[in-house]
Image (cartoon, coloured by chain):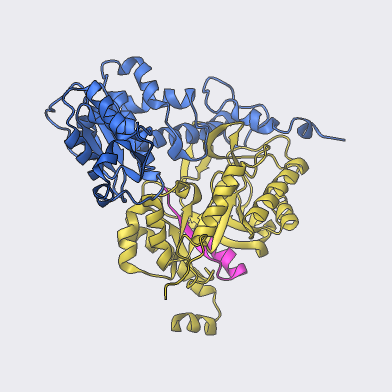
Chain colours: A blue, B yellow
């Protein structure tokens, strides 16, 4: 005859984990009272391990956000997020993708409108850190192209490449707060700072993109031919300089393959 | 003439290092210690890494692990396979684990008697299971599946626990002995976990070790723990991996090595990291215990090498 446990094969995991992220619940009734200690105190060790290790994981992914807000603010915010959105993957470097949106909606973070943008940069940084190792296109790959085909080339983005859009001065803040040092006394704050994040070798690059350049690179990343990408960049910003744009595209190491597409 | 490389050999093999950690001591590997470790290039140390930290596609983690693997044997320690969970193993995770083993050819491969995922939520902790004939059958299935997938024997680690289940019908040592017998897996004996669990549940660590299937142990873990004293005066030990190994744990370790001989021994230290010299000194203390267990001619041979 099947035991209760075979009929409900997930009973102990469901029973044990139900209260892990909810401190208001009683410890599961499926546990014995331990000798010489209250069960709630023992069960709270697991609760504490889960919540603290996941807050630590967010702090490791988002160090600049934590330096901007201070540790107490960050950990309180992260605690809400862990309870609302625990990880779905055992790979913790995949965790926290919903955190920037959570920050945008977090009531106490409203006076810090740039915070979510800095978080987006930090999430892109970690993706670049773990991305596949691929040689970026050398500048010579562009030199050999016939000029009349230039408008039709299509580039494959490097696996580490991300274009991060921002309506705030997130790149300046990222640079100022990403590593341990004295907080800057004053910052030149711009309105809009887009960034390229990539990793042509082992070092991660976070580079400010001037107006138009982010549209240009984003269009190339999504597979538009160069001519079209340039037109989209001009539409976005009349300040876009095609020569600087192409030079930046070549130098960044943001692409890893090139082909000539059908003429447009 | 140019050598022809088969398309599958995309990584440099580490074949000049045999699969051995016999009599070796080691530590958890932390990137912060890499410069000091590289300066010493002491091949008599092995290093243990948490498999999941190297499951990204590329970048600095693989560069660093490749560097450390050139000079040292490694132990690949999985922390989230959920072997002790009621749901099927995550096939994608098994595939990632297998890939890492093929790429880095670790001398030792281990996982935990625990679970950390329920449904789709990953709790990032080693959670306990009841010991019954049903959970035993599932743990055996999971170990069989994993060993078949990776094509080699795995070591399963005894847990540190803070609670016990009402429905348990067998002791932890019986449970461990049974799955080891049925699956042929090896065991990773974490002596700090034994001491922590014994204190928390009020049993004797020495009796536990007397009942433990020591002949199947392929690796030892030693680590530090924290002590909490409650309002009720009750003591709880927490497996924290953030301080030196406790003297009581060293004493149990000497007992085990006295019975088993020089098993590869690893010092785990995962947070509030010490300097490399402090961590290495812990490993050297373990080496002294291993050397003392060797018969005299064997010891002279080890020194001659």
**Picture coordinates of residue A254, whole percent (x, y):** 30, 42
Highlighted magenta segment, given as a residue range: B252-270
Quadrant location of residue B206?
Answer: bottom right
Quadrant where the N terminus of chain A sits is: top right
Instruction: Report if residue B230 is visible in the image.
Output: no
Is residue B119 or residue A258 the one in the foreground?
A258
Q: Is residue A158 visible?
A: yes
Q: Quadrant of residue B67?
A: bottom left
Q: Is residue A5 left or right of residue A141?
A: right
Q: Which residue is depicted at the point 41% across and 32% down? A: A55
Identify whether B288 is placed above or below A200. below
Assign the C terminus of chain A to one quadrant of the image: top left
> In the displayed structure, does residue B100 sit left or right of residue A30?
left
- Picture coordinates of residue B191, whole percent (x, y): 55, 55
Residue A75 located left or right of residue B129? left
- Residue A162 position in % (x across, y down): 34, 35
Q: Residue furthest right?
A: A1
Q: Considering depth in this image, is B84 or A87 the residue closer to the camera? A: A87
Above or below, A95 relative to B205: above
Inspect the magenta stretch and tell me whether residue B199 lies in it.
Answer: no
- Residue A45 is situated, as x and y percent measured from the top left of the image, at 51, 35
Q: Quadrant of residue A160?
A: top left
* Residue B256 within the segment the image draws in magenta: yes
**Residue at (57% x, 21% y) in the render:** A25
How many circles with numbers are drawn on the protein?
A: 0
Q: Nearer the viewer, residue B225 or B273?
A: B273
């Amino acid at each position: 005859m099947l035991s209760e446990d075979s009929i409900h094969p997930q009973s102990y995991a469901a029973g044990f984990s139900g209260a892990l992220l909810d401190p208001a619940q009683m410890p599961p009734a499926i546990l014995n009272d331990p000798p010489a200690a209250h069960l709630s105190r023992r069960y709270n060790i697991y609760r504490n391990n889960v919540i603290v290790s996941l807050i630590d994981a967010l702090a490791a992914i988002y160090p600049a956000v934590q330096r901007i807000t201070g540790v107490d603010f960050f950990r309180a915010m992260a605690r809400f997020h862990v309870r609302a959105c625990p990880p779905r993957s055992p790979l913790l470097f995949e965790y926290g993708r919903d955190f920037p949106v959570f920050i945008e909606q977090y009531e106490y973070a409203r006076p810090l409108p740039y915070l979510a943008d800095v978080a987006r940069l930090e999430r892109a940084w970690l993706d670049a850190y773990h991305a596949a190792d691929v040689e970026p296109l050398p500048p010579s790959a562009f030199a050999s192209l016939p000029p009349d085909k230039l408008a039709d080339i299509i580039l494959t983005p490097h696996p580490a490449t991300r274009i991060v859009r921002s309506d705030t001065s997130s790149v300046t803040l990222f640079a100022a707060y990403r590593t341990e040092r004295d907080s800057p006394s004053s910052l030149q704050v711009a309105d809009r700072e887009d960034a390229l994040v990539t990793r042509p070798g082992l070092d991660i690059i976070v580079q400010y993109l001037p107006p138009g350049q982010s549209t240009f690179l984003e269009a190339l990343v999504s597979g538009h031919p160069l001519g079209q990408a340039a037109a989209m960049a001009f539409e976005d910003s009349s300040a876009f300089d095609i020569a600087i744009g192409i030079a930046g595209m070549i130098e960044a190491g943001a692409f890893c393959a090139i082909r000539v597409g059908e003429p447009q | 003439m140019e050598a022809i490389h088969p398309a599958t050999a995309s990584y440099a093999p580490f074949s000049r290092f045999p699969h051995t950690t016999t009599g070796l001591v080691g530590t958890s590997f932390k990137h912060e210690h890499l410069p000091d470790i590289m300066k010493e290039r002491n091949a008599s140390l092995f290093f243990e890494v948490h498999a999941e930290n190297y499951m990204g596609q590329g970048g600095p983690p693989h560069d660093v692990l490749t560097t450390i693997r050139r000079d040292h044997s490694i132990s690949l320690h999985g922390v989230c396979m959920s072997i002790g969970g009621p749901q099927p193993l995550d096939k994608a995770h098994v595939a990632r684990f297998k890939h890492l083993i093929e790429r880095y050819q670790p001398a030792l491969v281990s996982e935990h008697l625990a679970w950390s995922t329920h449904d789709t939520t990953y709790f990032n902790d080693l959670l306990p299971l009841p010991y019954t004939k049903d959970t035993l059958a599932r743990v055996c299935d999971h170990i069989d599946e994993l060993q078949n997938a990776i094509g080699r024997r795995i070591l399963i680690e005894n847990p540190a626990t803070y609670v016990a289940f009402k429905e348990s019908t067998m002791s932890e040592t019986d449970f461990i002995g049974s799955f080891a017998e049925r699956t042929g897996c090896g065991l990773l004996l974490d002596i700090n976990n034994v001491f922590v669990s014994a204190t928390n549940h009020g049993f004797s660590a020495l009796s536990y070790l007397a009942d433990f299937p020591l002949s199947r142990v392929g690796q030892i873990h030693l680590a530090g723990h924290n002590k909490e004293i409650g309002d009720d005066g009750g003591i709880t030990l927490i497996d924290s991996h953030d301080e030196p190994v406790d003297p009581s744990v060293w004493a149990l370790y000497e007992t085990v090595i006295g019975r088993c001989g020089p098993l590869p021994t690893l010092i785990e230290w995962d947070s509030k990291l010490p300097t490399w010299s402090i961590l290495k000194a812990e490993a050297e203390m373990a080496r002294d215990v291993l050397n003392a267990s060797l018969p005299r001619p064997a010891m002279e041979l080890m020194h001659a090498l």
